[in-house]
Image (cartoon, rainbow, N blue to C red):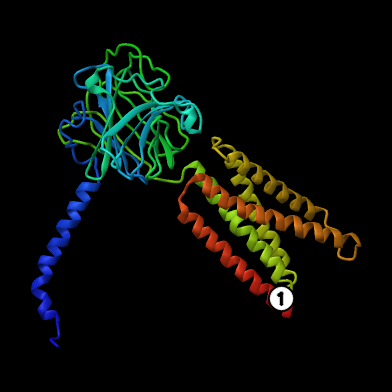
Amino acid sequence: MTRITMKHWHPLLLPLLLLCFVISSSSQSTSSDSCTTALSLGDLIPFNTTGLSCFQAWTSQDFILRFGKDSSSKNVWSFVLSAPDSGGYIAVGFAPTAGRMVGSSAVAGWVDTSSSGAGTARQYYLGGTSSSSCPPDKGNLALSSATASSPAIVSKGSRLYLAFQLTGQPITDVIYAVGPSGSLPSSNGFLPRHLDMTSGTITLSGGGGGSTSTGGGGGGDDDDNGGGEGKGNNKHKHSGGGDGDGDEGGKGDRRNSPSSSSSSTASSNGGGLNAKRRHGVLAAISWGITIPIGVAAARFMKSHDPLWFYLHATIQGLGFVVGAVAIVAGFRLDDDDGADAHKGIGIAVLVGGCLQVMAVLARPVKEAKARRYWNWYHHYVGRAAVVLGAGNVLYGLSLAKEGEGWSYVYGIFVGVCAVVYLVLEEWRRRH
């Protein structure tokens, strides 16, 4: 058998590396977008996109927003939202109340590759958190009335480009959403519940003479020169607004074209945790991890007296504070379908935790006859709170539609903890 050595491979290394580089570059060019390059969509978008401001609107989902005044009309604003094509819809809306989706008007678009591959873009009024409360072709956005400039969405290079124009000065508080992969609107046009959302702001320069309508479309004439300073803050709650110098162009952190004369700046804070995920992380850390550890410390470290007591009290106190913050944060979120049960369980867990705290303050001395009954109360109320808390974390993951992976990971963690608990319980029984 002939032995293949490095000497035989050496002449092939350079061509292989070049081939890998070409494939990698081709893949990146077809699946990514950047503010450093101009759009090259030709006539796929029904209006001129030259000179639009550009910024990374949502880093974790790779959303890029381009916007600016239409060069042929001083009272029309153009928007192009670019995002990866994950098989769902993408949407951008304008919020009368900063960071709040309910009450906003949005434009959503998707491409159905399973049939003709045609794209659909429609306006929606976000009247609630269920699909039926967000009717299509409703809303307060003053979309451009020109047939050639109606909302459109195209797919190119594994990305979607949602384009539309608004008449009048837009609202500066913006929301973004992405739909679940493989789940497109049905024939009635109702959107499936979004997989994730975030919010930000855009700051407009010029256009000081126009009035702002409820939801993004505008009303009056605009005597100032257009352009616009655009800022995108990837925050869940924020305050928007801004003023400008009325220039027609500008410069900023990100630009979509070297020849752009737009006085636009764009920035992003990155794809941090939104309010819903912060609530979930805090709940998982407290009721799902910290408090069960505190229970185990009290159960299996009694031989190390009084260390076990101080560990138990410290861990449970910390877990209770973080858990209470998580529950309060949960009440600040918009109601979702099925959230009432989740909140009810959370209230029950919080009440159980409060009862435990009060029980510590009323703990009888060891020699008292009531100590036996106090122990029963403390143990079983505490265990019920732990079981409900851990189960509610799993329930919350399913409501948030974070994907089965997170539920599997947490489920495996709970299973491993259960096995460790049984092993320690057997060791405790024997010793």
426 to 329, vertically: above or below: below
For the residue labelled by badge 1, is the local secondary structure a helix, a strand or a loop? helix
Farthest residue, direction right: 369
Mark 1 belongs to which amino acid?
Arg
Q: How many marks?
A: 1
Along the viewing direction, whichever of 118 and 164 lies nearer the viewer: 118
Question: What residue appears at the point 8 percent right and 73 percent down from the top-left corner?
Answer: 11
Left or right for 195, reference 417: left
- Percent from the top left, x then y, of residue 102? 49, 29
Mark 1 neighbour density, 10 Å: few (under 14) some (14–19) many (20 or more): few
Q: Residue at x 14, y 86 (%)?
A: 3
- In this rendered view, identify the residue nearer to me: 1 or 312: 1
Q: Is residue 100 visible?
A: no
Q: Is residue 80 left or right of residue 372?
A: left
Q: Quadrant of the C terminus?
A: bottom right
Q: Residue furthest left?
A: 11
Task: In the rendered view, tell whether residue 430 sits above or below residue 34.
Answer: below
Front residue of this view, candidates 83 and 315: 83
Quadrant in the picture for the N terminus: bottom left
Identify whether 76 is placed above or below 182: above
Q: Position of residue 21 (x, y in %)?
A: 16, 59
Determine the image quadrant of residue 112: top left
Give percent across and percent down for residue 421.
Answer: 64, 69
Q: Which residue is pictured at 68% across the width and 77% down the height?
A: 427
Q: Which residue is mark 1?
A: 428
Q: Position of residue 351 (x, y in %)?
A: 72, 46
Does residue 41 lie above or below 244 as drawn? below
